[in-house]
Image (tube, helix red, strand yellow):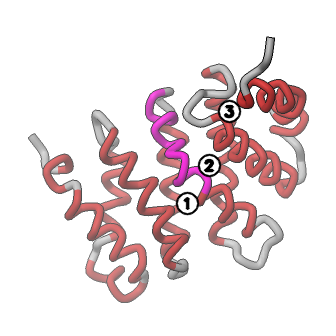
Amino acid sequence: MEQEPLDFLQDALLPIMKGLIAEALFKHCNEDVRVTVASCLSEILRIASPVQPYNDDQMKEIFQLIAEAFSKLSEPSTQCYEKALSILETIARVKACLLMLDLECEAQILHMCQHFWVFTRSNPSADESWAVEQIMADILAESEDISPDLLNHLLASVLKENEKAAPSGWKLGEKLISDFAAKLRPN
């Protein structure tokens, strides 16, 4: 019986997939190791998309690791910065945040978005801004209920003092509020 190309790829990736979710890697004391593991896992998500490559509990741990990796977006001088950018772009392209919503990963989503607001204060490139906007827009579009904490961060981004202090974050907040005004409006 001949295997489909995806079956062959999945069989080839299985040992790597198992190795990447080892607790020793998830809890490694070196943050560069954890960010590298998060980067590899984001690529596994890309390859497996739209299929969920791990069970729900493992996916929640993976998303926690990815959210942690996003803290490196605000540290461009570190070794992990480029890996964090790669993770950001991959998560945006495969719309992995929708899986986060399906798994009810509210804490991870909030943690991730907090890192995004810090990152946007550094005036990221157009591609980087696109990735953040894409993820945030997908979250807002697909959320049944917008968490008050997420809404507070969104509203804080458009405070008058942030227009000059953090123009990229301000523009992003303004665009998201404009695009999702009906959904954000209290009932």
- The image quadrant that residue 46 belongs to is top right
User: Which label belongs to residue 67?
Assistant: 2
Which residue is denoted by mark 1 in the rendering?
Answer: 115
**Residue occupying the point 83% across, 24% down:** 11
Circle 2/circle 1 CB separation < 8 Å: yes
**Residue occupying the point 85% across, 57% down:** 32
Circle 1/circle 3 CB separation < 8 Å: no
User: Which label belongs to residue 61?
Assistant: 3
Q: Amino acid at mark 1?
A: His
Q: Residue furthest left?
A: 187
Residues packed near mark 2 inside 10 Å, few (<14), some (14 to 19) or many (20 plus): many
Q: Position of residue 174 (x, y in %)?
A: 27, 70
User: Mark 2 or mark 3: which comes first in sequence?
Assistant: 3
Q: Quarter of the image for the C terminus: give it.
A: top left
Q: Amino acid at mark 3?
A: Glu
Q: Amino acid at mark 2?
A: Ala
Q: Is 45 situated above or below 182?
A: above
Residue 15 magenta-highlighted: no
Q: Is residue 42 left or right of residue 33?
A: left
**Residue occupying the point 53% across, 53% down:** 93
Q: Is 187 situated above or below 134?
A: above
